[in-house]
Image: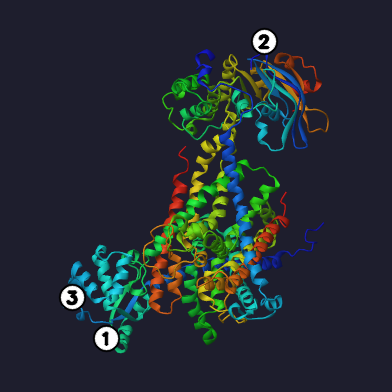
Amino acid sequence: MQNNETPQYAIETKDLSIFYGAFKAVNEVNMKLEKQKVTAIIGPSGCGKSTLLRSINRMNDFVPSSYVTGELLMHGQNLYGSNIDPVEVRRSIGMVFQKPNPFPKSIFENIAWGARINGFKGNMDELVEQSLRAAALWEEVKDVLKKSAYELSGGQQQRLCIARTIAIQPEIILMDEPASALDPISTLRIEELMQELKKNYTIIIVTHNMQQAARVSDYTAMMMLDKEGSRSGTVIEFSETKKIFTNPKDKRTEDYVTGRFG
Amino acid sequence: MNPTDNHYPSGEFFRKSLNIRYRIASIWQGIFFSALLIAMLSLAALLYNVVDGAFGYVAFEYKNDPAEFTAKPLNDLSRQELLDLLKNKLSSGAYKKLDNEKPMGSRSKSVLYTLVLERLIQIDTKQNWSMTDSILRGSEIKAEVAQKYPKAKLEFRSWLTPVFLTTPMSSKAEFAGVRTAILGSLWMVGIAILFALPIGTGAAIYLQEYATKNFLNRIIQTNINNLAGVPSIVYGMLGLAIFVRAFEPFTSGSMFGITDSNGRTILSAGLTMGVLVLPLIIINGQEAIKAVPDSLRQAAYGLGATRWQTIWHHVLPNALPGILTGSILAVSRAIGETAPLIVVGASTFISIDPSGPFSKFTALPIQIYQWTTRAQSEFHSIAASAIIVLLVLLLTLNATAVIIRNRVQRKY
Amino acid sequence: MKNTLMENKNFRPLDLKKKIRPGESVIQSLLFISGVLSIFITVAIVYELGKEALLFFNNPDVTLAKFLGTTRWQPGIGLFGIWPLVTSTLITSAIAIFVSLPLGLAAALFLSEYATLKARSALKPILEVLAGIPTVVYGYFALLFMTPLLQSIFGEGVEVYNMASAGIVMGIMILPLIASMSEDALSAVPRSLREAAYAMGATKFETSMQVVLPASLSGVGAALIIGISRAVGETMIVAIAAGSGPNFTFNPFKAAETMTGHIARISGGDLSYNSIDYTSLFAVALMLFLVTLVLNLVSQVVVERFREKYE
């Protein structure tokens, strides 16, 4: 689907609400996420950060009672439109999970499998090498590509998961607390990687670690329960990271980032 | 407030009652343990009972003197001489019948030798004793036999021999073997698994990966759980009514041009057994699939895989050891079941090897049943031998299942 | 860096439009059919059993009064009293439960409350072996070991075929089933409940009997019901050892054929499809199916309804 201008925004949401059955988990989110930038979604636990993230690549579809109202646009197309194929959506929007989940296969196969089911017909060895380089893992595993992915350390496994995601060339990469299960050194490497990756991909990351959000992201969305006693979350403030942390507009944001609560 | 101002016993009185409580507790612990002891004893008794019957003294007589048939000792006759002996001395009808079952010329020497013993010389078992009797009262038995059956030979026999495994059925206990039964069991189990494994695994995949929690799927699940508890003889009745009777053109092979049979074939037995083990395979398959961590599926879907791609490439391979173990358990179950086979029409006497799915059949547990219910004790001995064969078979199967479960833990 | 990665043309082109994937639909249909097949099986059982049983009851000679009111069962000569078969089934099953319930429960209590890990790994296999022995072997054991044993204890009154022998051996067969289901129920009781009792100074025995066992009652109840269902449906042990002719008696040392044994005996002989013998078998089988079905459903309800919530 060609547009006349290259849109500046990778993802746009318009009054997006996400439901699990009768329960409204996320309430009317409106935001525009810029291409090739890192956007962080922060906030206390239980206010729908992961739900919002997973709605972008339609992973919530696997929860039987889940549905959305409003629109989620990529390239101006509503990804929840009736004529949209969710399988292809997930191909163009990659996801890295909180706990590294490589397949019980070799390092090589982990990357090759995703490429193969998406019809890759080129030189697989080259693709694997370049994906591993892009994920800053090549030097460490180049001699042991046939080894099981499970023999890697946690940090290496997570980078492998990033490599297999970028191997299929998504435009956007979603990361759900990608470093929370890792030690501080691995965390740092992932954060450095994000700065490299954003040259080519749009990155949206959910994190409960404010300092991490301040370090890595260009934009920040602050999520919180929309009002007292409610169980629905919403984005109460969205702007450049610098502004959120130094001069937040909403008092609740200020309380959160200064550690007064959360 | 004085701590002793309460209504609980204290001091010496408390200690005494505590000791009583401890004694009661350890008595009951012993009682609980003795339940397990009883279980162990029962198992031991059962195994002992079986082994006891399979070995022991036998007093037997030759009905006809071998000298009537040949001057040379029987053991020295060549294969051709044995063949000639049978041809000449058996009635032509009997010889023709044997020849029709399997050409006499193609039978081995040992088979012909056994035939001579069985048909011409004919053995008459006078009495046989259990293993314990034979060992403990050996001399008593010898004296008894010398007195009661002066013409009889007495030997300590193992009714379970390698020959036992390769000999077909016979109406004489001394010459009967379990070969026909083993082959029948193998054919039947093969058909059962061929039917139940794909369908059962498919149903398990459907229920775990595709089915939503709606009314129809809950009914299906409850239904499967109930089918697992239906008595096996009811499955036999189902097989009788549907496979043997309603599907007769199919199961008897008349659809395919076979004219001399009815619905009571290996095919009917195999399908009936397949239906019986189907719920087990489904339930086991569901467990195996449930055990695959969801994170694998999420990773695959995140890369743009379809549902079946995820199942085929990730869920099934990881569930495979569990599914395999379940199939082996189903096979064990099918091999040991008797009641449905009786209803579906296992033959009471059949001595030729099954030649295909449309043959009449017998099975190992059927033989055990038939021999056990005969009055003569020599049949009990071969029943015991057949039981040992069956138990060894099952032990091997289950050991294989355990090995598979431990070894094929995904290498990764 | 994206420029150095393979260009897009090496992948299948991205197309967000909804696709029809015929392969996926075909596979899903096949799998669905496999799932639904199980319903067909139940329908077939009910239909076939019902059809022939209906033929039986529609026979002018057969009346409900005779069926429920007389005590001789020989359809071939016009006797249609079901009671001898039913009482034999009930008595053998009752004996089996009488043996297996206390023993199974006691074994479960020992394994779950007292046994060390090493003891468990040594003792559980014994139960598993008992559970895996084919019933025809148990039948052999009943006829050739248990009956002589009973005869040596109780003397002349024990017939060669008798219900007690079959019942006791059935109990041994069912023991592992009750033990393992009860043990699952006992193990499911959270440690915190036991620890609360110990902290108050209770002995292990008092804790097991007064705290753990009551909390697991629904699971034990389900085990009992399933055990009854197994006993009622069991064929080979009773076919070999309990007797080969219907006999209305309450003396366990006498021979009396059960419902299952009867079906096995008659169907093992010559049977023509339209005879009263044939249809009467299905009537008996239908009763058997309904009884075990009700028992199985009740056990599931018992587990649901009486499950103690631990939160």
Labels 3 & 2 near each other (Cβ < 8 A): no
Disc 2 marks a residue whose amino acid type is: Glu
Can you give x and y, in whole percent of width and height, for residue C293 in the image? 65, 62
The residue labelled by disc 1 is B151
Are the residues flagged by discs 1 and 3 in contact, CB closer than 8 Å? no
> Crowding at label 3, few (<14), some or many (≥20) Cα neighbours within 10 Å?
few
Q: Nearer the viewer, residue A252 or C101?
A: C101
User: What's the distance in space between the residues labelled 2 and 1, CA to CA?
Assistant: 113 Å
Q: Earlier in the sequence, mark 1 or mark 3?
A: 3
At label 2, counting other C-alpha atoms closer than 10 Å, the crowd grade (few under 14, some 14-19, many 20 or more) is few
Q: Which residue is mark 3?
A: B73
The amino acid pointed to by label 1 is: Lys
Residue designated by label 2? A5
Q: Nearer the viewer, residue C147 or C42?
A: C42
Quadrant hosting residue B26: bottom right
- How far is mark 1 from mark 3, CA to CA? 19 Å
Q: Chain of mark 1?
A: B
